[in-house]
Image (cartoon, coloured by chain):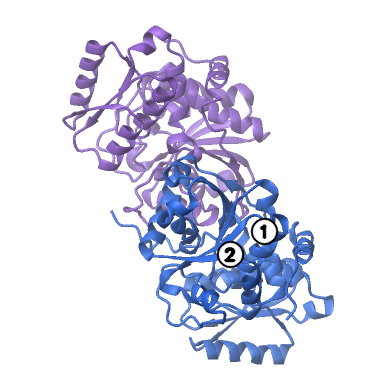
Chain colours: A blue, B purple
Amino acid sequence: MQLPTFSDILAAHELIKSYIHRTPVLTSKSINALMGCELFFKCENFQKVGAFKFRGATNAVFSLSDTEAGSGVGTHSSGNHAAALALAARIRGIKAHIVMPSNAPDVKKIAVAGYGANITFCEPTLQAREETLKKLAEEIGLTIVHPYNNFKVICGQGTAALELLDEVKNLEIMLCPVGGGGLLSGTAISTKSILPSCKVMAAEPKNADDAYRSFRDGFIHPSIHPQTIADGLLTSLGELNFAVIRQYVDEILTVSEASIIASMRMIWERMKIIIEPSSAVPLAVIMENKDKFAGLKIGIILSGGNVDLARLPFQG
Amino acid sequence: MQLPTFSDILAAHELIKSYIHRTPVLTSKSINALMGCELFFKCENFQKVGAFKFRGATNAVFSLSDTEAGSGVGTHSSGNHAAALALAARIRGIKAHIVMPSNAPDVKKIAVAGYGANITFCEPTLQAREETLKKLAEEIGLTIVHPYNNFKVICGQGTAALELLDEVKNLEIMLCPVGGGGLLSGTAISTKSILPSCKVMAAEPKNADDAYRSFRDGFIHPSIHPQTIADGLLTSLGELNFAVIRQYVDEILTVSEASIIASMRMIWERMKIIIEPSSAVPLAVIMENKDKFAGLKIGIILSGGNVDLARLPFQG
């Protein structure tokens, strides 16, 4: 299995940088004071389609040859990756085919359709989604772009940490959420290549701790019936992601749902920015482990800002 | 009645610029596409204490002589101005006395106390608040800083438009919300002085349209029992503010509550930033009057981002 290298990430950045937003790095004096450390938030919630996923999807789409691109791209997803792939394809002027479960929320169907993608509905099971996509791929000849277990996607996701480390020097810890491992694997390669002394840590909900257990045990545990508000972190690790993670990641820490919600609320209230629950998991890790992080200079990737405003977890 | 001039605003900016944040100007391609015009949002939701009020309060506090400052400052308010005055006073190292109704929400009491202010509670009527403050002023000799009907406060508020016009050239319209008129009067002086061709418009909730009626009729209508979600815009115009508004403002437009909520939601969802309902009123005006604003280059002051997350107006 060929793992992406730092030069692959640099090449990805060259390829995608005119299409993506160079998102801002924000700080908050009051959160620093409350946490007792110095935090630098890379705001991928301000990325196009509202999530870092646009980086990886754009790298995958623009890495295709003209012939490959002519047959389009496809994925099965109802989340940020689907929107990201749809927009990246539209920018290149090719077709994106998105397989979605029939019960996907209307707002997601509308978002993906709004980017001009073809949507194919199927039964709401993983098996139906995979089979429907595979059938489409055989019929049309499209290139399947997996949301995270994909070389080019990993390289694209690694560009967020690349920009953060370019802007903020001497970080001691790089912290990002882990679901399938696309963001974490890209982040880990960039960070260890640019600044080997910087520890790479991942944050995961306790209620979806398959990456924590996989990292500990040395093989991939599937994510079975995870119950967490961090709906971007439900999936199992990909094989390519896991190989990178084993090589480059220092530690995976898990947190409670209550801490995730408290962290999300702190970022909304203190920074006045909207992040989705998955993005709140790294700060939640710090909230639960203040001693461990005391006095350190820490980069955090805020992965996205797509949240259903009609279903927020804040109570009085 | 001496009205503030542009040179007073320039002097205010010199005085306060090292204490305030120079807030960013954000744009949104998707909102521009939906509205059919080009919008530049001056993000005072990212200002210290989460609102433009910190500009005026800081100018008032730092304009005092050492002798005046020694006796402290005071106001009656439970909102953004109270927090702003408290923080400005703390930065200067003087005492702030805030008169608050006994039924003010705990979160506001805690915020003001957190900035080190003395809080005096009183009955929850305007009369009790004014009398309590007056009594305090006589006893202690403090300087009362009115939230908007105050020369120095107006000059401070005018610095937001000053920065916006410095950053974005050739705006055709400047649009801001109007409550007591502090932000609007400062904004109007800055805008008409820097760019006389730029129209200054104010946005007001239909359910609190006292400024609209005052502007139309040429005298101040009091704001009586306004019922609007835009809780920063409940107050009547100040006399000094009204004099400036009559001289410099081109038009006041009112909007429905439904449009204010839709506008707030659009900014939260598309820009991933948190604004309070009062800040959503200008975009609501554009939503209701697309033809009027079509194709124009428009500056909008987003006045603040302090909102109770446990009581949001978004439904599914």
- In terms of image quadrants, where is residue A284? bottom left
Q: Are marks 2 and 1 on the same chain?
A: yes
Q: Nearer the viewer, residue A105 or B24?
A: B24
Q: Chain under label 1?
A: A
Report the residue that reaches farthest toward the top.
B67
Q: Which residue is mark 1?
A: A191
In percent of the image, x 54 and y 52: which residue is there?
B271
Front position among marks 2 and 1 = 2
Give percent across and percent down for residue B118. 27, 26
- Label 2, label 1: how far apart the Cα atoms are: 12 Å
Mark 2 or mark 1, earlier in chain: 1
Q: Residues within 10 Å of mark 1 (few under 14, many from 20)?
A: many
In percent of the image, x 56 and y 22: which residue is there?
B13
- In terms of image quadrants, where is residue B15? top right
Please tell me whether mark 1 sits on a helix, a strand or a loop: helix
Q: What amino acid does circle 2 point to?
A: Asp
Please tell me whether mark 2 sits on a helix, a strand or a loop: loop
Q: Which residue is mark 2?
A: A250
Q: Chain under label 2?
A: A
Q: Nearer the viewer, residue A239 or B235?
A: A239
Q: Residues within 10 Å of mark 2 (few under 14, many from 20)?
A: some
Locate the N terminus of chain B by quadrant: top left
In percent of the image, x 43 and y 16: which residue is there?
B151
Q: What amino acid does circle 1 point to?
A: Thr
Give percent across and percent down for residue A159. 69, 60
Locate the C terminus of chain B by quadrant: bottom left
Q: Is residue A128 left or right of residue A139?
A: left
